[in-house]
Image (tube, rainbow, N blue to C red):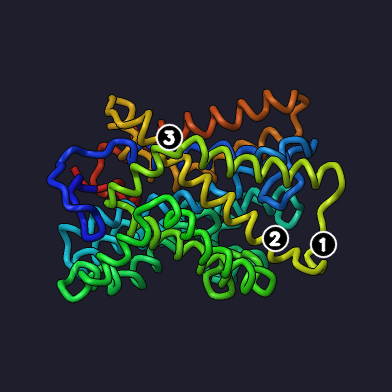
Amino acid sequence: MKPVTATLAPETKTTKRQYYIDWIRVLAFCILIFFHSGMFFVSWGWHVKNNVINHTMEYPMEWLHLWRLPLLFFISGVGVSFAMKSRTGWQFVSERTKRLFLPLVFGMFIIVPPQIYFERLQSGQFNGSYLDFYPNVFNFIPYPKGDFSWHHLWFVAYLWVFSLLSTPLFVWLKSGNAQKVVKTVRNLFSNIWGVWLLSVIPMILYWTLREKWPVTNNLIADWYNFTLSLTIFIYGYLIGTNQKIWDIMEKYRIAFISVGTFIIVFRISFDAIFGSIPDDIPFMPFVNGVLTMVSLWTTILGICGLAKHYLNFKNRFLTYSTEAVYPFYILHQTITVAIGFHIADWDLNLWLKLLILVLGTFGFSLFIYHFLIRPFNFARLLFGVKGK
């Protein structure tokens, strides 16, 4: 990511790197480790489960679930806005394929299968060693019926597809023919009301697609999740180097984060006290769409504004983590599932188990990255890290 001004940015000569963008990416990926560790303890479907389920933990996780992956798609689009400034369309596609598609294929054959193996063991669907289980992967029967899946790497698959689909748009936006449209878009959205207005398209997607296409992460029958994530990704590109919008996010950061948090706290509290209101009641899908997307979008705006205000600095942790975070993402869920499987029946306090899961996931991910990935160019290639 290069700190230069792209098409939708105000005309400025700044060359200072915007470190808060790196911080958002690093912290957003770290949140996933906490979230997936929490999935071990709640009633929602996941790969392995603790022997005691905790419903209270579902409340903060519901809040995280609303914006954690949209934030990642948004900040990925921001990164692309910088990357495209110095690349042709073909160069960008080639780089994305090497850094996304190659780790995806590697992950589907090497990283993900242990997750399925431990799930099959815990559920009693398989008995035997991992060597006995692994050939099942090559039956290429999609999970959950079979043992071939991308599991948490669906994010990588979608990001690669989004990059391919969006490249013609991004190339066009760089062209001279697009400058009139670019100027109009910049003037329309580079103010507080324009920023709020961006939540309307996600609302429309909620109203029209959510009920018919529940989230599956399977790419081919996931149209609500697919189109919403693609929209947020493109928003990230359009906003990425537009300093006016970043200034708006910073100026109104408290208002944005307060609105987003208030809506989700209100909805969770209401559901806990009175029970959820069925969507078949007149106007409820409309109301839910408005509340969900305003909460999602303002939370992203608030987080970005807070990061711009407080995290525009560099230190050794950020330098190391900026490169390490992608391998951590690829590795982390397999480690969490493996640890969870082995501690599921331990007679320990839930919070102590959660601490073991989180520290174990971070610790093993750090060990693997630092000693087995970071020093070797071939391993770096497989995990989407640029060579030394």
Tell us which disc is closer to us: 2 or 1: 2
Residue 118 image position (x, y, % from top left) = 64, 48
For label 2, the crowd category at 10 Å Cα-Cα, with few meaning under 14, some 14 to 19 and many 20 or more, is few
Q: Which residue is mark 3?
A: 306
User: Do the CB atoms of the residues marked 2 and 1 lie less than 8 Å apart?
Assistant: no
Given residues 250 and 220, the one toward you in this image is 250
Tell us which disc is closer to us: 3 or 2: 2
For label 3, the crowd category at 10 Å Cα-Cα, with few meaning under 14, some 14 to 19 and many 20 or more, is many
Q: Amino acid at mark 2?
A: Val
Point out the tag, 2 or 1, that comes first from the N-terminus: 1
- Residue lying furthest right: 274
User: Do the CB atoms of the residues marked 1 and 3 lie less than 8 Å apart?
Assistant: no
Residue 287 image position (x, y, % from top left) = 70, 60
Q: Which residue is mark 1?
A: 278
Q: Which residue is mark 2?
A: 287
Residue shown at 23% from the left, 55% from the top: 83
Q: What is the spatial separation of the Cα atoms under label 2 and label 1, in whole angstroms?
A: 12 Å
Q: What is the spatial separation of the Cα atoms under label 1 and label 3, in whole angstroms?
A: 35 Å
Displayed quadrant of residue 282:
bottom right
